[in-house]
């Protein structure tokens, strides 16, 4: 696109640069998501700030935000902060782990779990978000690491439906931990930044705090788990030994 400071794009060129239709551009403009073009005579021209807006709208739409929520984001932030908003949003919504989902056929599922793979088990795994159907006979395992853990439990004699119950319990606890750390970020990082008027020069610090938050939450969770696991094993062992002595 043109690097000139003046808006140089027609609506057709803007739509092409943004990878969308002219109709979508007009729809976003009519909803106030896009600033009006600069008029020269009877023709409107668009520039980099318009493209940045469309970039942000597309990003947020892909992440599941509705147009009303997007409008609120755009209303809160000046044009010069759009790049920071876009980068921050991308950082916030990108999964922290680098784990890639695995796609397998229904045959692979059947071979892996055998008679345990009942329709009810499949439905529960889908409801929990552990797997999802992506084709006629294709499934996506959202977390291969979690799937391997379930397979290992099965090899130890734990039925798959019980492994799913454990997974559901883990999900509840993980959600609670995630919310606790997000609340810490909101209270001690974001809200002071917001009260200060969201100064442009403070955006890097906010993004750095977010980047440090997620691994810190994971490390803390593992650390607490290790302490609690050791205590649980010790308690179970003491009870087992006491029962053996009584016999």
Image (tube, rainbow, N blue to C red):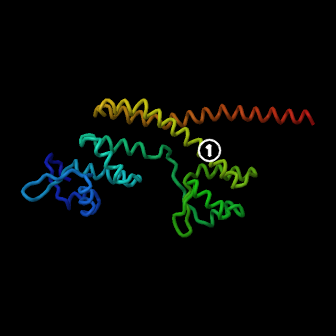
At a point 62% along the width and 49% down the height, the residue shown is 168
Q: What element carries label 1?
A: helix
Residue at x-position 76% and y-position 32%? 235
Q: Position of residue 116 (x, y in %)?
A: 71, 61
Q: In which quarter of the image is residue 191?
A: top left
Mark 1 surroundings within 10 Å by alpha-carbon count, few (fewer than 14), some (14 through 19), many (20 or more): few
For residue 149, side relative to residue 192 (left or right): right
* Tally of numbered tags: 1
Q: Could you tell whether 147 is left or right of 230 in the image?
A: left
Measured as percent of width and height from the top left, residue 215 is found at 50, 36
Q: Which of 226 and 77 is in front in this view?
A: 77
Residue lying at the far bottom in this picture: please name it: 136
The reply, left or right, for residue 150 in relation to residue 69 is right
Task: Tell me: 177 left or right of 148.
Answer: left
- Residue 150 drawn at (x, y percent): 66, 51
Q: Residue furthest right?
A: 247
* Quadrant assignment, res 86: top left
Q: Which residue matches tag 1?
A: 170
- For the point 31% across and 29% down, which residue is it? 196
Q: Position of residue 92 (x, y in %)?
A: 42, 43
Q: In the current view of this chain or complex, which residue is farthest to the left?
A: 41
Quadrant into which the C terminus falls: top right
Picture quadrant where residue 160 is located: bottom right
Query: Relative to the observer, which residue lies in front, 94 or 68?
Result: 68
């Amino acid at each position: 696109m043109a690097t000139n400071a003046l808006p140089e794009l027609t609506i057709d060129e803007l739509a092409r640069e943004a990878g969308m239709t002219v109709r979508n551009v007009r729809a976003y403009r009519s909803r106030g998501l896009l600033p009006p073009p600069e008029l020269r005579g009877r023709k409107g021209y668009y520039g980099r700030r318009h493209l940045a807006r469309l970039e942000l709208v597309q990003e947020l739409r892909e992440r599941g935000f509705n147009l009303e929520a997007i409008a609120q984001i755009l209303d809160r932030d000046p044009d010069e902060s759009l790049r920071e908003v876009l980068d921050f949003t991308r950082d916030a919504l990108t999964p922290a782990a680098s784990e890639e989902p695995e796609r397998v056929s229904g045959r692979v599922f059947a071979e892996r779990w055998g008679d345990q793979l009942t329709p009810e088990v499949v439905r529960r795994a889908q409801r929990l978000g552990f797997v999802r159907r992506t084709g006629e006979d294709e499934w996506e395992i959202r977390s291969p690491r979690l799937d391997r853990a379930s397979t290992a439990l099965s090899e130890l004699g734990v039925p798959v439906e019980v492994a799913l119950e454990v997974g559901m319990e883990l999900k509840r606890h993980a959600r609670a931990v995630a919310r606790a750390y997000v609340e810490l970020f909101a209270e001690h990082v974001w809200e002071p930044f917001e009260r200060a008027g969201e100064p442009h020069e403070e955006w890097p610090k906010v993004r750095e705090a977010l980047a440090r938050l997620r691994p810190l939450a994971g490390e803390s969770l593992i650390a607490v788990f290790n302490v609690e696991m050791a205590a649980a094993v010790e308690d179970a062992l003491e009870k087992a030994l006491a029962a053996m002595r009584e016999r």
